[in-house]
Amino acid sequence: MSTLLNTWENTPSLGGVIQYFAILAGVAFAGTVLLEGTRHCPNSLPARMAGFCWTYRNRGILSSSSANGDWIPKPKGQAFKGNSQELQTKGAASCKAWYSLYQRYGPAYEITVPYFRLHVINHPRYLEHIQKTKSKNYIRGAFTRNVFGKLHRSGIFVADGKEWQAQRKAATRAFSKQNFERHITKSLHHCLDILMRLLSNLAKTGTEFDFQELMGRFIFCIFLRMAFHEDELALDIMSDKPESLNSIPKYVEAFDKATHLFDRRRRDPIWKLTEKLSGEDKITDQAVSLFYEQMDALVKKRMDAIASGYKYNPEDGGVDLLDLFMQSTNDPYELSGMVFAFLIAGRDTTTYSTAWLMKEIFHDDNKHLDAVSKIRAEAKEVIADGGYLEYANTSKMHFTHAMWDETSRLNTVSPAGQMEAAEDDVLPAVPELNMPPRKIKKGDIVSYQNYVLSRMPEVWGDDAFEFKPERWFDEDGKTISFSPFKYHSWNAGPRSCLGRPLATYEGISIAAAIIQRFDVIMSDTTKTYEPLAALNMGVKDGVKMRVRKREDI
């Protein structure tokens, strides 16, 4: 998975050239409108054209004017392009680009790109306003639907209003305590059995492998079991045989490719033209079609079974996601989209978070934490001999949980997000930033970067950059929690991440199971591991390691 992403990341882009022609097209379109408006008064055309050029002399073409005047920090923009050059970055560079903007302009500023004005709002008070106080006013909006609609279909991540509420309600049932104990835990333990056998076989030959790539396979297998009770397809992705890592099913590869291409689309305001001229639109469509061909087939298989008399039995292995979603709709198109939403929300987030966790556990920078010994001691106390962590006992793994939370804070796998203002609004003042109330126009975008937020001394103190699991304990050693508007890695408010308990349970269970049974030899324990930012932030070039079976157990 990470190899594919790195390959695509280095693919040359025509974006800069195409954007230039797109701006010319926008100017031509505007010129046509101006001509239409001057048909009866042709002498006014030069003045209108001059006014148009003056209006967009330093901001993105057709973006809104600022409602906040000159007091709000703004990078100087280029004529018609606005601040596009600041965001013309690939992969990991996007995180650093946003951090560079923060260093120059602070946590709160405005930028423009063609067609949009973005209000950057990196502060808990702003986040609480848009995600709690006025959450109904901040929606996914037309931009998100246009960019991601084909990938998500009508899924929860592109839905608003009643459609979103209905899907959220259906999704909530998937994470009930009962379903965790009956279906989710059994699915995880089943897949952990396979993973432990695979690692034992890799240990016999001392084979190096990419842990992040392996986790991508592992989490996809869990998804197939939790969503469809599907084991046969999962074995094509990962079995206990090392040879299974030498190939990947085409629909899984298509999923990785599609999510990467759609992330690039998210960063390109003129993606329709860019992809049409580069031919990337056909590649994107093929990837989406190939993935959904498999999902649609699994949905059809279940619907055919129901037509033949199949009924799910909650006592027999639990209720899978498809069973739950079919209580809300029988539309195959919608069902595949709803299932996909869970895959894209859970697969890469858990994969990458677990990869970052293992990196933090074994990196030389964190030797002083003695993490391996502490995790083994906790696992010995909490987990039955030869078994795996039960969901109810996750909170008892205090140190491991703190390692997970600190990993998720500093290496947040959802590096950025944005919402569209449905109506005019005013953001609250932030006195500690010396920021008065900020006006937001209808249709403007509010944007936040969790990568930046987690590194801000204004939010986390002077040690914000440091990996410190001890920040999750009070002075008496009791675990503490932070406001979700501060610890924003899992979103907040009505749209907070439903899958956080699942991702946390999976990540802690995986780390504990491996560290209990194996010594891990990370291939490079000294280098700086860089982020690979896509829709979710992975580890650039992966996390290479070998394992050796422990002899002291």
Image: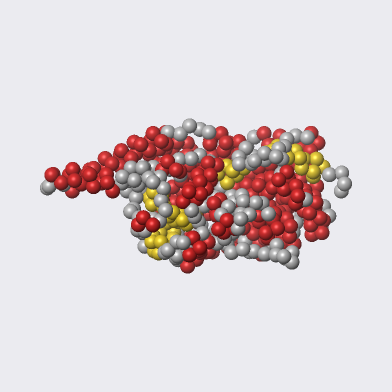
Q: How many marks?
A: 0
Q: Is residue 549 left or right of residue 250?
A: right
Residue under the point 68% across and 60% down: 472
- Establish if 352 lies above or below 179: above
Hey, which residue is sitting farthest right in the picture? 552
Q: Is residue 47 left or right of residue 20?
A: left
Q: Is residue 440 visible?
A: yes
Quarter of the figure that contains the N terminus = top right
* Colour scheme: secondary structure
Q: Nearer the viewer, residue 546 or 327?
A: 546
Q: Is residue 305 left or right of residue 245?
A: left
Q: Nearer the viewer, residue 451 or 279?
A: 451
- Residue 440 placement (x, y as % from top left): 39, 60
Residue under the point 67% across and 39% down: 527
- Residue 289 placement (x, y as % from top left): 49, 41
Residue under the point 50% across and 66% down: 132
- Residue 32 placement (x, y as % from top left): 22, 43
Q: Is residue 150 visible?
A: no
Q: Nearer the viewer, residue 290 or 232?
A: 290
- Residue 256 placement (x, y as % from top left): 56, 41
Q: Is residue 477 left or right of residue 109?
A: right
Residue under the point 54% across and 51% down: 452
Q: Nearer the viewer, residue 279 or 66?
A: 66
Q: Which quarter of the figure has residue 420? A: bottom left
Hey, which residue is sitting farthest top in the picture? 12
